[in-house]
Image (spheres, rainbow, N blue to C red):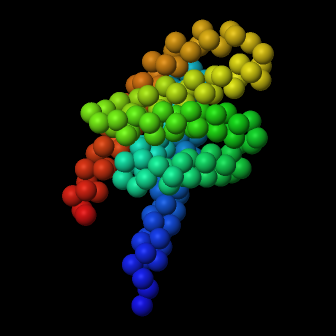
Amino acid sequence: MKSSSTRERTRRVAYSGLLLATMLVLGYVESLLPAVAGVPGIKLGLSNSVLIFAVYMLNLPTAWTLMVLKVLLSGLLFGGFNTILYAMAGGALSMLFMSILSRVKGIHPVTVSMVGGVMHNIGQVAVAMLLLHTRQLLYYMAVLIFVGMACGALTGVVAVSVMKHMKAIR
């Protein structure tokens, strides 16, 4: 008979695999959608709802692992090196802030998601500014901050809704 720790580890790996697959599918579906309002670089960030879920329902190391795997696999499957570079910068900065804020009492997951959306955009613009040697992208940042907040709110609401249902199932 398997020990309870082995069962728990197996359950966590299987659960993580399902979440990673969900993030990859959401990312792929999102790549098929036209640019939001015709503005390049703006996406809903649907897979962020899965990361918010992982931050609150699993643990931070698992959420970080899911983010890194999603970036690498999405980049290999649907993008390339530049895609991985931009997504990793945005994802790491987003996860850093979401990891910190998720542990602060009184901060709602939707707020954490909104900050994550904004930080993801900041990380990507910072990399673009470094690679392109231009500060002109700072003008675009005002739009991206607003969009990051709005899309972060949407994905946060989705994550909170799923978390409520998952808690009820348990």
Q: In which quarter of the image is the N terminus?
A: bottom left
Q: Quadrant of residue 89?
A: top right
Q: Where is residue 23 in the image (x, y as percent from the top left)?
A: 51, 50
Q: Is residue 91 visible?
A: yes
- Identity of the residue drawn at 74% across and 36% down: 82
Q: Is residue 140 or residue 93 the one in the foreground?
A: 93
Q: Position of residue 131 (x, y in %)?
A: 77, 23
Q: In which quarter of the image is residue 137?
A: top right
Q: Position of residue 73 (x, y in %)?
A: 65, 52
Q: How many marks?
A: 0
Can you say whether 52 is above or below 3 in the image? above
Q: In which quarter of the image is residue 104?
A: top left
Q: Which residue lies furthest to the bottom in this view?
A: 1
- Identity of the residue drawn at 40% across and 25% down: 150
Q: In which quarter of the image is the C terminus?
A: bottom left
- Identity of the residue drawn at 52% across and 19% down: 144
Q: Is residue 58 or residue 78 the one in the foreground?
A: 58
Can you say whether 126 is above or below 10 in the image? above
Q: Where is residue 109 in the image (x, y as percent from the top left)?
A: 34, 37
Q: In this view, does 89 lie to the left or right of 102?
A: right
Q: Is residue 34 visible?
A: no
- Identity of the residue drawn at 56% across and 33% down: 93
Q: Is residue 94 left or right of residue 166?
A: right
